Amino acid sequence: MLPEMPAPAIRTSGLSKDYGARRGVFDLELQVQGPEIFGFLGPNGSGKTTTIRLLMGMIRPTSGQAFVFGLDCVRDSVAVKRKVGYLPGDVPQFGSLTGEEVVAYLGGMRGGVDRRRVQSLCERFELDLSRRSREYSNGNKQKLAIVLAFMHSPELLILDEPTSGLDPLNRQDFYKLLREANDAGATVFLSSHVLSEIEQICDRVGIIREGRLVRVAELDELRKSGNKSLEEVFLGYFIEEPPKLLGS
Amino acid sequence: MTSVLFGLRLGRWGVLGFSIAAIASVFIQTVGYYQIAGHSPAEHAAFGAAITTLAAQLVALFPAPVRPDTVGGYVEFRGFHPLAILFAVWALVSSTGFARGDEERGIVEASLATGTTRVGLVASRAVAFAVGLIMAALAAGAGYVLGVSADRESVAIGRVLEESALLVAIGLACYGIGLLVAQLSPARSATAAAGGVLLALFLVNSLSRVLDWLTAWRWLSPFRYYDLSQPLPPGGGFDIRGFAALLAIAVAMTGAAALAFAYRDLGSALIAVPAKPRPQSHAPSANPLWRIAVVRGVYEGRFGLLAWSVGTAAVAAAFALLTRTVVNVMLQLPTLLPYLSIFVHQRLYPAVLGYTYFNVAQLLFAALAIAHVARWSAEDVSGRLEIALSQPYSRAAVVVERVAVLTAVGLVVTAASGVTLGLMSHYEGIDLDTGRLAAASLMLVPFALVFATAGALLAGWNPRAAVGLLGAFAFASYLDTELATVFKLPAWVQDLSAFKLFGTPLLDGIDGRNLALTIALAVLGLASSILLMQRRDVGA
């Protein structure tokens, strides 16, 4: 008897969200078999955030289904979120709550928070939790969102443009954190349009264009196709004649 | 010019809403006069006496009416005086919204980046608000003209324009004051500080009508200069000096605000107190309250809870303190005795106190519910709901927790105001039935929940419009209650008002049918909002 295969970290089947006027996501067939770091690439408005919100059960699909570790993202939404750490594309505003209170509040909703884990994350990113959320710079708000996504050491991290607002040093720290989480067995699904970071950290990439998944491939496989850089491959999907890149 | 148009564009819903409220309320009051005042001179005189009675009860809020037996005097009192308060609130929200709200959203920074000077920006937004005010004030005047014309009575257009000009002037004066206070206070407390200053100025003037020692200070209040004119009734007049004083206050305060804005850093108050050095923290708060559902919501809003408790308790105390004085004044007027006879079968003081206080308390609890709905809508827009739903917490639990927080807050606020009312009335020698007082106070909570669950439903449908729509529902409900008897509206129309559900529990005890209906409506609203929350998109 064959051993039962573990359910993929993410699986979508004919997943669509139609906002009308050709906006949304259409017939998405995607599988992310953890643990890996999967980069989700696409220009602004291509459907990256919509896909992520569908996976998180924030929005309901027009048709099709999405599963996280075999759990239906709509029906089993609460169970899904026990396993997931989420960083939204729009960093939430917590007004006059301090960072300490935000972490305690959301940790409380999660049923408890590992103080040592939070402490180590904050020290790593030099994030002072004693300050009010409204006083944080954009970068610090992003760091707080990173802490909230990683604080419970989730099995799956769903991150929507996670490095936006971070300075180069903190970006490197963040990439290291991703690698560590992945080495510890976590799967990472992150959207970005920063090609260099996708090249640096991802094992596989999916490219989405006008709501449709146009390519899923290993990064090495993409690189091998005609000795092109990821940037050239990416631009190839969006511009009929990609411009000569600087230095190429 | 572009900045003025941009300011108008940002405030277009406010202009539209207040214009509609102005024309509707004034028109209804004007038409209402012809419905209830009778036709003969004797009927008019009797009606005027009854309104004088009512005015005596409300003397701490509104100036005494001039010739309330005439349409001008009546509408001045019932239509335009409350509208002046409404316009002051509009001015408060607009001024602090521009000075600090737009600043937090980056709109001010973007505007200044275009090369607009700070003084120019303040001036353009003040002009935009003035244009909006003029439109709403003219709408109020139009409501009066339409109402009077419907009865084929002639209208002195000049007086109507004077009345509209007065509304514009009080609105601009309050706008200038709000704008200045907002420059001096930190962003997060700007609305509260400006609201506190305007409330204090209003009370200095209005309470000076019953407390002699305050008369020496009322020159400070713009509402004093508003009171000097009553252009509509015969025998009233338009005090040009009072009007000029209001405009002078508006110009001086707006100018001072522009100057303060020119000298302060964006995001800071003019005089910013340097932050105390704090030890850095890398750990979450150890406060266990954050871990307990409902308690964390109450704890987060603890300062608001304190303000609501103190505020409603102060209102209760003020009513208890003023009741004996007001009723004694009324008893000295023989023409008022028929009106008071409706309370004769009750004990007079408790009956008047119960009737007047709980009327205002209903409005306050509707406002408390609307304030919570505003917070829920803000959580949706700010992304906080999305991050909360990324925790293993069901959507139904989020809705239930929100309503439970409001219930807990409502219980604390009503306990504070109920106990204060009981103690202060006892101190004044007005003994209320303790059981009925407790029941009436508790009844305010399900009453607020009806508004809150309707608001939760609206917030689920359209978070940006929820507060406006709920406010409109509260306003329409209140008008329905106020005008039902005037217009002899059919019973089913009267039953549409949420305020009708409350009844008069301090006078007659709790009406079991009303209580059951109130609870049923709240439960229905809760269930519907849970269903809607489960089906809707969040963050889209």
Image (tube, rainbow, N blue to C red):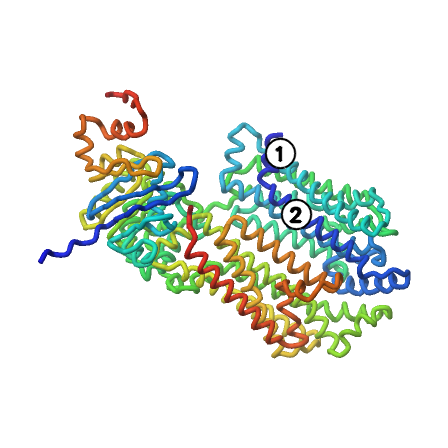
Residue A133 is at least partly visible in this image: no
Is B96 placed left or right of B245 in the picture?
left
Looking at the image, residue B411 sits to the left or right of residue A74; the answer is right
User: Which of B420/A226 is in front?
Assistant: A226
Q: Which residue is mark 1?
A: B4
Classify 10 Å Cα crowding around label 2: few (below 14), some (14-19), many (20 and above): many
Secondary structure category for the residue under label 1: helix
**Which residue is outermost to the left?**
A1
Tell me how far mark 1 sits from mark 2, CA to CA: 19 Å
Q: Is B97 drawn above or below residue B42 in the view shown?
A: above
Where is residue B278? Give x, y as percent.
40, 50
Q: Chain of mark 2?
A: B
Q: Are marks 1 and 2 in contact (CB under 8 Å)?
A: no
Q: Residue at x 31, y 50 (%)?
A: A65
The disc placed on residue B18 is 2
Q: Is residue A119 above or below residue B438?
A: above
Residue B528 coordinates in the image, percent (x, y)? 48, 61
Q: Quadrant of residue B472?
A: bottom right
Type of the residue with mark 2: Phe
Chain label for disc 1: B
Element assignment for label 2: helix
Residue B249 visible? The answer is yes
Q: Residue at x 35, y 48 (%)?
A: A63
Q: Position of residue A210 (x, y in %)?
A: 35, 35
Between marks 1 and 2 in the image, the one whose residue lies nearer the viewer: 2
Counting residues from the start of the chain, the first of labels 1 and 2 encountered is 1
Work out which quarter of the rendered image holds the N terminus of chain B and state it. top right
**Image spot of residue A163 (x, y percent):** 32, 40
A43 horizontally vs B275: left or right: left
In the picture as drawn, the residue positioned furthest to the right comes out as: B41
Instruction: Inspect the image, locate mark 1, and give the three-letter code of the amino acid beneath it.
Output: Val
